[in-house]
Image (spheres, rainbow, N blue to C red):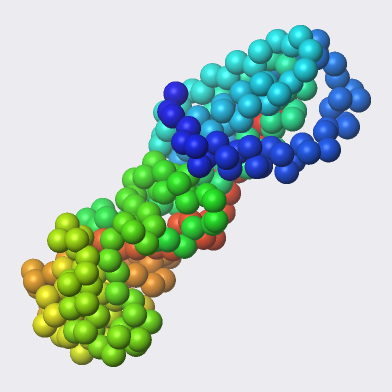
Amino acid sequence: MQTISPITEQLIDLALTEDLCAGDFTTDAIFTDKDNSKGRLIAKADLVLCGQHIFTFIVEKIESRALGIYQPVTIEFFFDEGARVKKGEVIAAFSGSTQVLLKAERTALNFLQHMSGIATQTRALADLLPNTRVVNTRKALPGLRELQHYAVRCGGGHSHRFNLGGGTMIKDNHIAAAGSIAKAVQKVRDFAPHTLRIEVEVETLDAVREALDAKADIIMLDNMSPELMREACALIGDRALVEISGNVTVEKAERIRDIPVYCASCGALTHSVHAADISMRFD
């Protein structure tokens, strides 16, 4: 089983406290610690599976809080992380304490569905851009960044900066406040460790030329049309790595798949993804 980081454990503790701080009147009224159940997790749509270890960890957390003598819960997943699952297939089988299973159900599913949704969307975009690295952004939900980045990797994508200390990226507001791309790049070059590449966000061909003159390592073409992207790539050549960003989606992938860029970043992979449709059914 994968290691759960302290950040993720705190997040799970918060989620469980939020859901169970007043107890579970329904479950405790109907079942005792001697009642047991078994059932399955079922894919209600095609998906890429992600978050099995989180699902299992949440169940174990509930077990550790349970009172009385109960049958421990066992969970058997039938797919690897990152595997494609077809609609109707059984993802996992479980058995054990009815109280534990019902108290864990919603929170465990929330994480599994969210992470699988990210992995599914990432896989779809990566399949459409086979020659380009698909990367996420820092547009992640607070507290979920670690799990969201992990889910992107499960879907065949890659991480961009995990946080502000993970790289240097000169964006439009940095440029506006500094006065020019050249000034911003020079200040970063004088300040940052030599091990960090310098990335500059641009929106016009004139800005591309300025970033090239400043010897930026990576040039991000932000919100450009496919036609303008092609012009920019021809201008850049092999003088810098090229990233494209802004409205990179599954629907628009066909228009950009032949543009020779190093990576395509997509904030929608983490900030507005649809949860995968997974049901937890008792037999």
Rendered view: 63 above or below 124: above
Rendered view: 118 above or below 97: below
- Residue at 69% over, 37% down: 16
> x%, y% of residue 229?
24, 77
Rendered view: 211 above or below 65: below
Rendered view: 264 above or below 110: below
- Residue at 42% over, 49% down: 149
> x%, y% of residue 40?
63, 24
Residue 204: which quarter of the image?
A: bottom left
- Residue at 73% over, 43% down: 18
User: Is residue 215 toward the left or the right of residue 44 in the image?
Assistant: left
Q: Quadrant of the C terminus?
A: top right
User: Is residue 241 toward the left or the right of residue 253 in the image?
Assistant: left
Q: Specify whether residue 58 is in view.
A: yes
Q: Nearer the viewer, residue 45 or 179?
A: 179
- Residue at 54% over, 33% down: 54
Q: Quadrant of the N terminus?
A: top left
Q: Specify whether residue 46 is in view.
A: no
Q: Nearer the viewer, residue 68 or 89?
A: 68
Count the marks.
0
Residue 96: which quarter of the image?
A: top right
> x%, y% of residue 217?
16, 68
> x%, y% of residue 247?
41, 71
User: Residue farthest to the front?
Assistant: 191
User: Is residue 179 toward the left or the right of residue 33 in the image?
Assistant: left
